[in-house]
Structures are given as structure tokens and as C-alpha cells.
């Protein structure tokens, strides 16, 4: 593996919530459990249906999570991946995470498949806002300064389409890469979990880093059972 890592030119990395776990961000699934907010399973509160039924409750859930994120820092896994971008001729970091920790660690051009928790967008005119720049306290009813309609978190909820072009860009790189890492994802959510399948079908060597097995483990050429923050820096030594 070290030899492959040292010699690879085109590398694609897909990350999930597990890469932020060592920073203290709770994962959605894993360890036989799944996240719950006020007794509601996360796949209900983070769903397009909930947005229609109870937008203020959705905002409360995301405001809470931004509050948690304000207190934490990127971990050695985020920092290792930020270094990798300068190590390979062609490096693509694709994340399902909405927490912005890859960027805070220094990663550039991150392909965010599921949006970003620090952004909001208007439900009517689609104007976008950086919530760190809004300069108002956490609200259950953010409104658009352009058209006055309600804002929503700029994230991809269950049953919603991914941002235009994001998956296509990632899939193109998956087809071209020679080494593909799948790090800290339960690999249950599509189309993201299809990327390593695309890479593998196109001949890439695929490596999973996760303390638990996933539905992709059998497909991967190599499975490293461990924590991302402990494993990733080892590749560089
Ligand atoms: C560590 C660690 C450490 C712990 N180090 N590792 C094909 C078949 C069936 C269904 C579908 C399909 N295609 C599409 C669908 C529908 C649906 C879907 O996939 N459903 C499945 C669950 C069945 N997909 C969608 O709806 C997507 N939209 C779409 O496809 O549009 C077109 C369409 C619509 C409807 C029907 C068909 C087509 C959108 C998906 C959006 C996902 N959104 C969320 C919420 C974002 C907002 C928010 O933050 O609240 O995204 S759900 C949640 O899951 C979040 C994550 O990004 C995503 C993936 O989770 P992830 O990252 O894998 O985290 P966990 O928690 O699941 O796993 C953590 C892992 O880390 C575990 O394995 C641990 O072991 C590990 N770990 N510590 C390394 N230290």
C-alpha cells in the first residue's frame, strides 16, 4: 500500500461523517446506533418532507449543530487530507460532510455532495447566504434580504437532488483515478456510495478506512479497520 501511495498520480478520496468523529462531531450512524434529535430520527428531521412541515424545527436542529461546530477543530485526518492535495498530480477530495472542516484544515476545491451547514439559501429566489456573515443570533425563521421569503439550510436532505454538477464532477474523477480512498462513511447513502463502485469498475485500487465494516468493504481491495485520524498520517511516513 505504501508503494501504491508513493507512486500514485491520480487520487480520489470520498469522506463521510467518520472523518470528523475525532473532532467531536457526532456521526449519523455507526456503533449500532443512529442520531436522534428530540426523539426524532435524523433521517426524518433531515428530510425534504420535514422542511415542508416544520421549517423552524429544521432550523433549530441545524442551529444546534452549528453551535457544536463552533467549539471544535479539524483533526489529524482533515489535516492529512489537506497535505495530500499538494502531494499528488491530480487529487480530488469529495465529501458528504456539511461541516466545512476539510476547508478549515486547508483543503481547497472540496467537492461537497451534500452542501454546507454554514450556508443558507432562499426557498424562492435561491439567493445564498453565509450564516457566519449574517450577524444575527440563531433564528428559527431566517428570511431573504432579496425577496423576503424564508431561507433554508443549503444542505441536501433525503429525497433531494444533489447540487448541480457536483456528483458529475466527482464521478468523472472516480472514473479517472488510479487510487480511491473511502474514509469514514457507512456507504449507505446514494449516489455518494456509488463513487468507489465507479472507481473500482474503472480499474482503480480502492482502500477503505473505517473502524467498522460497510457494504463497500467486500468491493474494496484493501480494508483498514481503524480511526481515520490515526491511520491517514501513517501513509505519509
Ligand atoms: C469512523 C470513525 C473514525 C466512526 N474514523 N471512520 C439508490 C438506492 C436506494 C435509495 C436511493 C438510491 N439513490 C438515492 C436514494 C435515496 C437516498 C438514499 O441514498 N437512501 C438510502 C439511505 C437508502 N438518497 C437521496 O435521497 C439523495 N438524493 C438523491 O439521490 O436524489 C435523487 C433521488 C431522490 C429520491 C429517490 C431516488 C433518487 C440525497 C442524500 C442526502 C443525504 N443527506 C444527509 C443529511 C445532510 C444534511 C444533514 O447534515 O443533516 O447526508 S443524510 C446523512 O447521511 C448525511 C451524510 O452525508 C450521509 C452519509 O452519512 P455518512 O457520512 O456515511 O455518515 P454515517 O454516520 O452514516 O457513517 C459514519 C461512518 O464513520 C461509520 O461507518 C463509522 O463506522 C465511521 N467512523 N468513527 C473513520 N474515527
Image: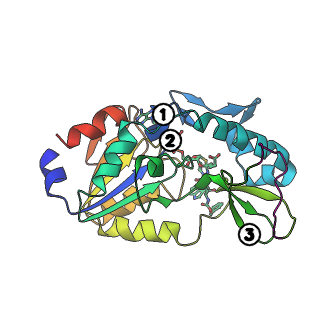
CA gap, disc 3 to disc 1? 31 Å
CA gap, disc 2 to disc 1? 7 Å
Q: Which residues are magenta?
A: 136-146
**Disc on the earlier residue, 3 or 2:** 2
In the image, taking residue 165 as reference, residue 228 lies left or right, namely left
- Residue 126: mark: 3
Is the CB of mark 2 within 8 Å of ligand 1?
A: yes
Closest to the observer: 72 or 159? 72
Is 13 drawn above or below residue 229 in the view shown?
below
Is 55 drawn above or below residue 92 in the view shown?
above
Is 33 drawn above or below residue 61 in the view shown?
above
- Residue 17: mark: 2
Residue 152 location (% of width, % of height)? 76, 56
* Tag 2 near tag 1, CB within 8 Å: yes
How has the structure been colored for display? rainbow
In the image, taking residue 12 as reference, residue 20 lies left or right, namely right
Q: Residue at x 45, y 70 (%)?
A: 169
In the image, taking residue 42 as reference, residue 197 lies left or right, namely left
Q: Which residue is mark 1?
A: 21
Is the CB of mark 3 within 8 Å of ligand 1?
A: no
Element assignment for label 2: loop
- Look at the image and say whether residue 222 sits in the magenta stretch: no
Element assignment for label 3: loop
Q: Dot 2: within a 10 Å radius of its alpha carbon, few (fewer than 14), some, or many (20 or more) residues?
A: many
CA gap, disc 3 to disc 2? 27 Å
The residue lying furthest to the front in this view is 135
Q: Nearer the viewer, mark 3 or mark 1?
A: 3
Is 122 drawn above or below residue 71 in the view shown?
below
The image quarter containing residue 228 is top left
Residue 190 location (% of width, % of height)? 54, 56
Q: Quadrant of the C terminus?
A: top left
Amino acid at each position: 500500500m505504501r508503494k501504491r501511495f508513493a507512486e500514485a498520480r491520480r487520487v480520489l478520496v470520498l469522506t463521510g461523517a467518520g472523518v470528523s468523529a475525532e473532532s467531536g462531531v457526532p456521526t449519523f450512524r455507526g456503533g449500532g446506533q443512529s442520531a436522534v434529535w428530540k426523539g426524532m430520527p435524523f433521517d426524518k428531521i433531515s428530510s425534504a418532507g420535514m422542511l415542508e412541515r416544520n421549517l423552524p424545527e429544521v432550523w433549530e436542529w441545524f442551529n444546534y449543530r452549528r453551535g457544536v461546530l463552533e467549539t471544535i477543530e479539524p483533526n489529524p485526518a482533515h489535516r492529512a487530507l489537506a497535505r495530500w492535495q499538494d502531494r499528488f498530480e491530480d487529487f480530488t477530495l469529495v465529501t458528504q460532510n456539511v461541516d466545512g472542516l476539510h476547508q478549515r484544515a486547508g483543503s481547497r476545491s472540496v467537492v461537497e455532495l451534500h452542501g454546507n451547514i454554514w450556508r443558507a439559501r432562499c426557498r424562492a429566489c435561491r439567493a445564498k447566504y453565509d450564516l457566519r456573515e449574517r450577524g444575527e443570533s440563531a433564528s428559527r425563521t431566517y428570511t431573504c434580504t432579496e425577496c423576503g421569503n424564508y431561507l433554508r439550510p443549503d444542505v441536501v436532505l433525503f429525497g433531494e437532488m444533489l447540487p448541480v454538477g457536483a456528483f458529475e464532477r466527482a464521478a468523472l474523477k472516480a472514473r479517472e483515478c488510479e487510487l480511491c480512498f473511502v474514509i469514514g462513511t457507512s456507504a449507505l447513502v446514494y449516489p455518494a456510495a456509488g463513487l468507489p463502485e465507479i472507481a473500482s469498475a474503472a480499474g482503480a485500487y480502492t482502500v477503505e478506512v473505517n473502524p467498522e465494516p460497510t457494504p463497500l468493504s467486500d468491493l474494496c481491495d484493501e480494508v483498514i479497520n481503524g480511526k481515520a485520524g490515526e491511520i491517514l498520517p501513517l501513509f505519509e511516513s
